[in-house]
Image: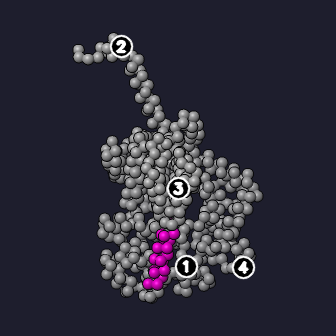
């Protein structure tokens, strides 16, 4: 069953690639996720330089060709384009490498192959985990619904994006922890120590691809805290081990990418290029999206899902509080769009006026925005509670449908997350703790929609309703099987039943 299941998963997912890509409009529009990342692959692949790209196309696909381009066209070299690396996300560059290795060409790379491999690996690992704990039927249903998710299929197979990594990471985390979720199928003690290390390595790495995925740390904490038959000291050690592994992995990758950043600055300065003097940015800033995200339901304090809304509020306060120059942004209709030549030198990172500074990069901006958000919440907690309640309602009404897809053939039912309440009560009453933990494990995938922003597709990140439906269908099938067996036994004529005394040769 295990071998057939794993082969079937890969075959089925590859069948979804072509000629039936799912295009249902289940797309995340709240953020781009990727900018001009592909332009930086050529020099990273051939010379190990990151971030370096050229405004002049490189036509020779070789290390010697890349070295010659750097030597002959230093003025075309840049360390950023369209603010690709403004908010970190440095590990995104790795997603292009499988495609480059397969094609042997780094000039038009794609992330689809890496996304596909990771997603199929997650589905196979999840099925393996369910098989290990003795629930292969539930595993098959979970894989069917998660692997048919229209948002995920579109993000993996159609888009050049990193939006699939929240769900992919959640499935990988579930696969790692499934052996710990069934109280009657205890893994070996060694795996109890291996699981948190693997989880930390995974989340510390994926954080550099899509930062929201790191919220699955909460699922790991839930798993270790709910372990049966172990002391609280042991459970706390497992939590600390996972967090320590996560922090160490994140730190290690940041040190690597910061070294690459400094090396790119050094090389460009040496050859006469245009190094970027901007400080190295590790991860996405948090307070600006929280500020803008409150605009989904705010009617009192002027929040909007628009970058310029934050600048409208922060700019005069930054100038008066800190007595500093605040550079204008590039977009919007609020009077901030200007031509580079009209700006003072303080609006640029470099003397050549190539790299513009943005107000969102300034620590003073984050401080002003943070004070505004926390101040409004502290003064009016009822207002914030109302927004959270509206987000939860929207989340549970704007989810992806529960779908089973086989190529162009699809069966689906509309989904509502509110079914989780009676299901949890039922599972608790029945003592089905393994099934309950499976459903609860994926709840962190809804955090973005609840705590940041609930519009423009962020509710599609949530997948707990898929596992909820898998549990419901598995229970119904089990009940139906028992009912059929009982009915067959009841309607069977007594005359045809063989008693133990009659057993033997006819």
**What main secondary structure does the magenta stretch of the protein show?**
helix
SS label for mark 4: loop
Q: Residue at x 39, y 83 (%)?
A: 70
Q: Nearer the viewer, mark 2 or mark 4?
A: 2
Say which of 378 and 72 sits in front: 378
Residue 82 has which mark?
A: none
Q: Residue at x 43, y 59 (%)?
A: 159
Which quadrant: the N terminus? top left
Say which of 426 and 13 sits in front: 426
The residue that mark 4 highlights is: 323
Segment tinted magenta in the rendering:
250-267
Q: Earlier along the polypeptide chain: callout 3 or callout 1?
A: 3
The residue that mark 3 highlights is: 238
Q: CA distance from mark 1 to mark 4?
A: 21 Å
Residue 493 has which mark?
A: 2
Q: CA distance from mark 4 to mark 3?
A: 48 Å
Q: Is residue 406 left or right of residue 309?
A: left
């Amino acid at each position: 069953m295990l071998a057939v299941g794993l082969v079937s998963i890969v075959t089925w997912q590859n069948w979804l690639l072509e000629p039936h890509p799912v295009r249902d409009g289940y797309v995340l529009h709240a953020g781009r996720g990727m900018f001009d990342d592909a332009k930086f692959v050529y020099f990273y692949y051939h010379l190990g330089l990151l971030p370096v790209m050229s405004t002049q196309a490189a036509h020779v696909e070789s290390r010697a060709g890349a070295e010659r381009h750097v030597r002959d066209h230093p003025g075309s070299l840049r360390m950023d384009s369209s603010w690709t690396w403004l908010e970190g996300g440095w590990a995104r560059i790795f997603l292009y490498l499988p495609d480059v290795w397969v094609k042997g060409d780094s000039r038009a790379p794609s992330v689809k192959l890496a996304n596909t491999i990771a997603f199929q690996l997650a589905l196979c690992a999840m099925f393996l985990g369910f098989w290990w704990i003795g629930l292969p039927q539930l595993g098959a249903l979970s894989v069917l619904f998660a692997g048919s998710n229209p948002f995920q299929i579109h993000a993996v197979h159609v888009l050049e994006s990193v939006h699939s990594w929240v769900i992919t990471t959640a499935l990988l985390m579930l696969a790692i922890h499934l052996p710990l979720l069934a109280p009657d199928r205890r893994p070996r003690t060694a795996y109890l120590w291996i699981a948190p290390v693997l989880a930390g390595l995974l989340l510390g790495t994926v954080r550099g691809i899509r930062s929201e995925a790191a919220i699955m740390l909460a699922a790991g904490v839930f798993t270790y805290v709910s372990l049966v038959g172990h002391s609280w000291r042991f459970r706390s050690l497992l939590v600390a081990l996972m967090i320590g592994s996560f922090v160490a992995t994140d730190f290690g990758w940041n040190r690597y990418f910061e070294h690459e950043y400094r090396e790119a600055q050094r090389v460009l300065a040496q050859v006469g290029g245009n190094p970027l003097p901007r400080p190295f940015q590790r991860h996405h800033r948090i307070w600006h999206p929280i500020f803008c995200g409150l605009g989904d339901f705010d009617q009192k304090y002027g929040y909007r899902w628009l970058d310029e809304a934050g600048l409208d509020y922060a700019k005069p306060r930054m100038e008066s509080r800190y007595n500093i120059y605040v550079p204008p942004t590039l977009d919007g209709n609020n009077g901030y769009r200007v031509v580079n030549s009209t700006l003072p030198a303080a609006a640029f990172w470099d003397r050549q006026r190539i790299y513009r500074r943005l107000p969102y990069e300034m620590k003073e901006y984050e401080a002003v925005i943070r004070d505004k958000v926390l101040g409004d919440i502290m003064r009016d907690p009822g207002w914030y509670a109302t927004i959270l309640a509206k987000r939860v309602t929207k989340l549970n009404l704007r989810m992806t449908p529960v779908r089973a897809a086989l190529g162009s053939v699809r069966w689906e039912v509309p989904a509502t997350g509110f079914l989780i309440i009676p299901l949890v009560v039922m599972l608790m009453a029945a003592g089905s703790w393994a099934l309950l933990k499976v459903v609860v494990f994926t709840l962190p995938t809804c955090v973005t929609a609840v705590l940041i922003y609930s519009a423009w597709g962020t509710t599609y990140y949530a997948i707990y309703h898929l596992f909820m439906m898998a549990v419901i269908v598995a229970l119904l099938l089990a009940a139906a099987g028992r009912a059929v067996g009982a009915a067959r036994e009841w309607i069977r004529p007594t005359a045809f039943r063989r008693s133990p005394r009659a057993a033997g040769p006819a």
